[in-house]
Image (spheres, helix red, strand yellow):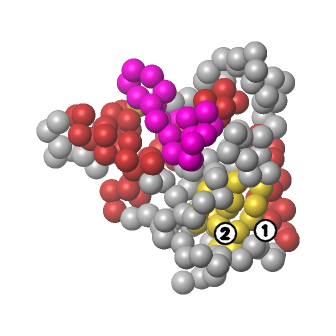
Amino acid sequence: MEQLSWVTVPTPLPTGPMRFAVTPAGVAAVSYTGEPVAGLTAGVPECAEERVAAVVRGRVGEYFAGRRKELGLPIDWRLVSGPHLAVLRRLSADVGWGSTITYGELAARSGVFEDVAEPGTAARTVGQMMGANPLPLLVPCHRVVAANGIGGFGGGPSGLETKRWLLTLEGVLPPTLDWDGPGG
């Protein structure tokens, strides 16, 4: 397995800085809270390759400043496989900046749940897959919402607040008077 290293990026999010696990193939994992990512062992060092770290920090910074709608960072899919990978790839390909999709719509569009008779089961499974997404922000699970509202979000105690912040940045939700995003 290729060596992983972390790039820490300051963000305006309620969760604080994000960490991006990078390999020569691309970004393999992202953490909103600095907590461990499933599938990664402790002791992953900070990225010593300044060119890589600068690209990640620059693109993520431009995204949070509202100047970049797609991060354009290569993805290393090593931590996902099977149906989870198929759903995440569909999300990544189909749901861009400023748009959302429901858990049920993503389940149907992914083609993974064709044999599931109960649509609610497929939607709930997609929700669990979003909660286990090792590549949040790059594979935009914040854009997956419930049929009757915003839905849930990981990222620790500030997770739902983070989802609202990201959807506000992307223009899906209107800014509130206390929103501190670009132009906020």
In front here: 67 or 134? 134
Contact check, label 2 and label 1, Cβ < 8 Å: yes
Give residue 22's mark.
2
Residue at position x 70%, y 54% in the image? 18
Circle 2 — which element? Answer: strand
Visible residue check, residue 98: no
In the picture provided, is 169 more to the left or to the right than 172?
Answer: right
Query: How dense is the environment of label 1, judged by Cα within 10 Å: few (below 14), some, or many (20 and up)?
Result: some
In the picture provided, is 172 more to the left or to the right than 179?
Answer: left
Circle 1 — which element? Answer: helix
According to the picture, the residue beneath numbered tag 1 turns out to be 52
Residue at position x 57%, y 42% in the image? 157
Residue at position x 65%, y 76% in the image? 44
CA distance for labels 2 and 1: 8 Å
Residue 59 place in picture, x, y as percent: 78, 51
Residue at position x 54%, y 72% in the image? 40
In front here: 105 or 4? 4
Q: Is residue 14 above or below residue 98?
A: below
Location of the C terminus (image quadrant) = top right
In the picture provided, is 170 more to the left or to the right than 126?
Answer: right
Figure quadrant of residue 97:
top right
Query: How dense is the environment of label 2, judged by Cα within 10 Å: few (below 14), some, or many (20 and up)?
Result: many
In the picture provided, is 63 more to the left or to the right than 22?
Answer: right
What range is drawn magenta here?
143-162
List the single residue furthest toward the front.
157
Residue 88 place in picture, x, y as percent: 45, 51
| Label located before the other in sequence (2 or 1) | 2
In front here: 77 or 12? 12
Residue 62 magenta: no
Name the kind of residue labelled 2 in the image. Val
